[in-house]
Amino acid sequence: MKTPSAPHFRHRFPAEIISHAVWLYHVFSLSLRDVELILAERGVVSYETVRRWCKKFGASFADRLRGRRPRPGDKWHMDEVFIRIQGVQHYLWRAVDQLGAVLDILVQSRRDANAAKRFFKRLLKVCNMCRECS
């Protein structure tokens, strides 16, 4: 038996509707019931169906979005900011590229430079892996 190449094979609804439902759920952070209401005009789709589609196709959708994200610049630096959260002082570490895009954030209740360095090294490792894959 030949296996189908289309991931939406043997689904009741066309691939465009499935993709649209997954897109609505992930991009706009809508609830499953909200997506159900939006898609009600195209046919009867329950929130449970949307949940199954998001579970099945959500990872591939996220991979495609990640691939379209602009690559960070080649020069990075760390920012340290003192902030108060409910009256308690915390330390916010941000990894920023030369264009000002925030790459990642770390909030700590104690000032721990070694943990911030580990955070930055982990970010470097993850972003270097992303560059090699694409």
Image: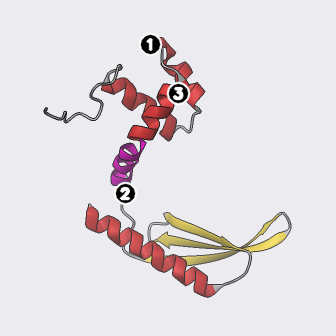
User: Mark 2 belongs to which amino acid?
Assistant: Pro
Quadrant for the N terminus, please.
top left
Residue, disc 3:
48
Does residue 37 appear in this view? Answer: yes
Q: Which residues are magenta?
A: 58-68
Residue, disc 1:
43
State if disc 3 and disc 1 touch (CB < 8 Å): no
Percent x, y of residue 104 = 53, 66
User: Mark 1 belongs to which amino acid?
Assistant: Gly
| Residue at 56% across, 19% down | 37
Image quadrant assignment for residue 125: bottom left
Per the image, label 3 sits on a secondary structure element best described as helix
Q: Is residue 105 left or right of residue 45?
A: right
Q: Magenta includes 60?
A: yes
Disc on res. 70: 2
Q: Nearer the viewer, mark 1 or mark 3?
A: 3
| Residue at 30% across, 66% down | 131
Image quadrant assignment for residue 80: bottom right
